[in-house]
Image (cartoon, rainbow, N blue to C red):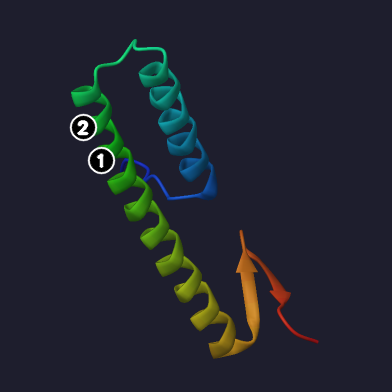
């Protein structure tokens, strides 16, 4: 069996935002060193940018398919995108 590929989503962006918020709060309370905060901030910002890029690429692919045949296929069911 092939492993499932994790798709980027707005939920992924929200999770990274929540992590970022947590390290900010930890830094404000001096629980986290400035060096560690800087490192984690950079990692989270990079991850956010990658997820946003993947989401935009998926949106572009979806829009290209809709323009191509005028329909959207969702889990085996076809819906008209425009009447």
Up the image or down, 74 lies above or below 63; here it is above
Bin the neighbour count of mark 1 within 10 Å (Cα to Cα): few under 14, some 14-19, many 20 and up: few
Q: Nearer the viewer, residue 31 or 58?
A: 31
Quarter of the image that includes the C terminus: bottom right
* Structural distance between the alpha carbons of marks 2 and 1: 5 Å
The residue shown at (34%, 54%) is: 49
Based on the displayed image, in which of its 4 quarters is residue 53 positioned? Answer: bottom left
Residue 52: which quarter of the image?
bottom left
Residue 54 in the image: x percent, y percent?
38, 60
Say if 60 sits above or below 55 in the image.
below
Label ID, residue 23: none
Element type at marker 1? helix
Q: Residue at x 28, y 47 (%)?
A: 46
Task: Give percent across and percent down for residue 31.
Answer: 34, 10
Q: Is residue 39 left or right of residue 41?
A: left
Are discs 2 and 1 less than 8 Å apart at CB? yes
Q: Which residue corresponds to mark 2?
A: 39
Residue at 37% across, 43% down? 4
Residue at the disc numbered 1: 42
Residue 41 location (% of width, % of height)? 30, 36
In the picture, the quarter occupied by the N terminus is: top left
In the picture, measured across the screen, residue 33 lies left or right of residue 44, that is left
Report whether 48 appears left or right of 71: left
Pick out the residue farthest to the right: 83
User: Residue 80 versus residue 46: which sits nearer the camera?
Assistant: 46
How packed mark 2 is, by other alpha carbons closer than 10 Å (few <14, some 14-19, many 20 or more), is: few
């Amino acid at each position: 069996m092939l492993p499932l590929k994790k798709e980027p989503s707005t939920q992924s962006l929200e999770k990274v935002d929540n992590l970022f918020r947590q390290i900010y709060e930890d830094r404000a309370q001096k629980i986290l060193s400035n060096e560690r905060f800087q490192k984690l901030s950079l990692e989270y910002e990079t991850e956010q940018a990658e997820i946003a890029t993947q989401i935009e690429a998926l949106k572009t692919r979806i829009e290209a398919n809709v323009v191509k045949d005028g329909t959207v296929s969702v889990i085996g069911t076809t819906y008209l995108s425009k009447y």
